[in-house]
Image (tube, helix red, strand yellow):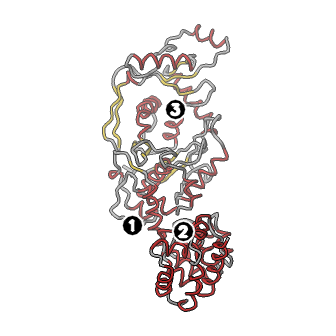
Amino acid sequence: MPTMIVRTRFAPSPTGHLHVGNARTALFSALFAAHAGGDFILRIEDTDAARSRPELESVLLADLRWLGLSWQEGPDVGGKHPPYRQSERSQIYRAYTDKLAESGLTYPCFCTPAELALARKAQLAAGQPPRYAGTCAHLTAGAIEARLAKGLKPALRFRVPEGGTTEFQDSVRGAQSFARRDIGDFVIRRADGSPAFFFSNALDDALMGITHVLRGEDHLANTPRQLLLLRALGLQVPHYAHLSLLVGPEGKPLSKREGGGTVSELRETGFSSSAVLNYLARLGHHYESNGVMTFKELAAAFDISKLGKSSAHYDLTQLRHWQKDVISEVKEAVLWQDLIDSKEGERIKRLVPAEKWHEFIAFLKKDIKHCLFPSEAADYANMLYSGKLIYGDAAEDVIRKATEKYFSVALGSLARNSHDYKQYTATLSEVTGLRGRMLFMPLRAALTGLTHGPELDLIWEMLGPNRIRQRLEAAAEIAEH
């Protein structure tokens, strides 16, 4: 027997930006295929013409590539089973719905959305699982013709066999069994002629030779319907692995309100793709290593048996931890390139002298906890290299609240202690009588334009006596006014 070539897929709809939960699904699918030396396929499910936005397809592809994913087949690279946009596969769907119809496995349904909603409400009120009641299942040919003559456009339903169960083995959740009486006849083609998700999704998986489908557990109830369709058509049935869903810190389904944004938003914030990749790879999957790993290393250690059944908690605090680890480990040249490629890149290049970038990056690495993102790096560039310091509102407020003699004493002490930060602050404390925050915060605000950041002794060393004096003088002017 020939060895099976693993083929996985990710099938997003271009109706919005790529959510982190969907990004994790794509990542696990890509990791599983790479681990097995197989193929990862990208398919665009854009049959919902009202909600699909073609311009979002390029954004989806860019986000996936930013994460480090690549695919062997897809709408942009082609492959053995084109086309890879469902909107271009209408003739294929029509051929297979005709095949089901010829076998007597479908029927037209003229029920309106309002009628279906009313029936569903009644079933729920009676404590019954909502399922199609079969209203149109036994319409005569004459009754169907009469409705069509009135201009009514029917959906097409698949006849679910009566009695028995539909069973399958899930790679994450084990043996699964669904009673067919609870499924009900379901729509495979909408009234507007477009294929329903159950049908097009399953059919494309089979026709594209997908061997393993990794997807969220919210699709678990869809699987028996799709198995019935594939078996009725005599097509290949893939192995399924239904992944636990992501939840927010409070255990609620992940949403933007719960801190679950999109990949585009993470990119915009300035998160490293490596940080996002490493964090998502560990949400619901266990790795022995806690260090930063490349996609290739993550794939080599990926094990589908280590996917957890429990919900995975997504927490931006943990993602920030990975951001810190990546910055700690990345080479200085790579970090510099990431910064100048960011939205803050032009500002950083304008502020940091070309010959000083090594010094700047080394400084950032010493204070990673305060500088994780390009926006913060730009503030540091202003702090270290700006000829005329731009003060933040909070820093100006601190300077204005300092005592009248603070900055005159600060300037007077500088001549005697310009090269010794500890001695300088000791003298400043002795003369002003200030300690702790009251002593150091005005000095920090004056020298950096910020109210937080690296240790002042590091700043003192980087600025040097001349710029320290210039900034104390500028702060003194602010304090006087």
Tag shown at residue 291:
1
Count the marks.
Answer: 3
Q: Earlier in the sequence, mark 3 or mark 1?
A: 3
The residue at the point 35 percent across, 60 percent down is: 287
Say which of marks 2 and 1 sits in front.
2
| Spot occupied by residue 196 in the image (x, y as percentages of width and height) | 55, 31
Under mark 2, the amino acid is Thr
Find residue 468 and report its horizontal and vertical position in percent. 60, 83
**Residue 365 is at least partly visible in this image:** no
Left or right placement of residue 308 versus residue 123 in this view: left
Q: Nearer the viewer, residue 144 or 277?
A: 277
Q: Which residue is mark 2?
A: 451
Q: Is residue 378 above or below residue 207?
A: below
Q: Residue at x 42, y 42 (%)?
A: 252
Between disc 3 and disc 2, the foreground one is 2
Residue at the spot of label 3: 199
For image coordinates 39% across by 16% down, the residue present is 126
Q: Dot 3, how many residues are within 10 Å of its Cα: few (below 14), some (14-19), or many (20+)?
A: many
From the viewer's perspective, tell me whether residue 479 is left or right of residue 11: right
Q: How would you rate the neighbour count of disc 2 (Cα within 10 Å): few for under 14, some for 14-19, many for 20 or more?
A: many
Distance from disc 3 to disc 2, alpha carbons, whole Å, reads: 58 Å
Q: Which amino acid type is marked by label 1?
A: Gly
